[in-house]
Amino acid sequence: MPLPDIWNPEATARLCSRISSIAKDTKPAWGQMNAAQMMGHCCIPYEQALGIKTTKPPAYMRIALKLFFKKTLTNDAPYKKNMPTAPAFIMPADIAFEENKQRLLKLVHDISDMGRDAFEGREQLTLGRLSAQEWNNLLYKHIDHHLRQFGV
């Protein structure tokens, strides 16, 4: 089943509504992150897509991710619970909640405003060039996974 289109204004509004419904004290259904850590964690793929965070992982890791995990990361099947987190995506426990929530909301809008065409063939730090649909799936299913983790 296709995932919602992150460049569709209605899908963007639904994502933002889900993000906005999470409070600092919202507890996860699984995993170790608190709500603030999750907000900061979810910003990273969007920042990478925008060229804000551009530190590439080591070559061996990029090759492994591209060969063995690209399909899992970009298909339309939801992520499983309790998957390991890459070191670059781990946030400190005392990260600011509201600041990161607002940052995430802005990033979701920024990507949406750029439109699908801006992502066709765009380079991803570890997976190489992706189609717009692969970008959609990568970004949507990651954030959806963590919103479901926090009950929304």
Image (cartoon, rainbow, N blue to C red):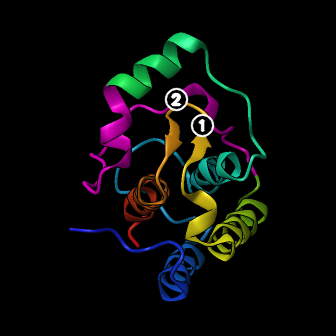
Q: Name the residue under label 2.
A: 86
Query: Do we see residue 123 in this rendering?
Result: yes
- The stretch of residues the image draws in magenta is 68-95
> Which image quadrant is residue 72 in?
top left
Q: How crowded is mark 1: few (under 14 residues within 10 Å), some or many (20 or more)?
A: some
> Which image quadrant is residue 19 in?
bottom right
> Which amino acid, by three-letter code, is at mark 2?
Ala
- How many numbered discs? 2
* 86 part of magenta stretch: yes
**Where residue 132 sits: x, y (%)?**
49, 59
User: Which of the pair 83/70 is nearer the observer?
Assistant: 70
Q: Mark 1 points at which residue?
A: 89
Q: Main secondary structure of the magenta part?
A: loop
Query: Do we see residue 82 in this rendering?
Result: no
> Which amino acid, by three-letter code, is at mark 1?
Phe
**Where residue 142 sits: x, y (%)?**
45, 53
**Where residue 149 sits: x, y (%)?**
39, 58
Secondary structure beneath disc 2?
loop
Cβ atoms under marks 1 and 2 closer than 8 Å: yes
> Could you say which disc has been placed on residue 106 in the image?
none
Q: In which quarter of the image is the C terminus?
A: bottom left
Q: Is residue 13 above or below residue 114?
A: below
Determine the residue positioned at 28% across, 55% down: 78
Left or right of residue 69: residue 39? right
Left or right of residue 95: residue 128? left
Determine the residue positioned at 63% across, 30% down: 88
Q: In this view, does 135 lie above or below 4?
A: above
Determine the residue positioned at 75% across, 46% down: 51
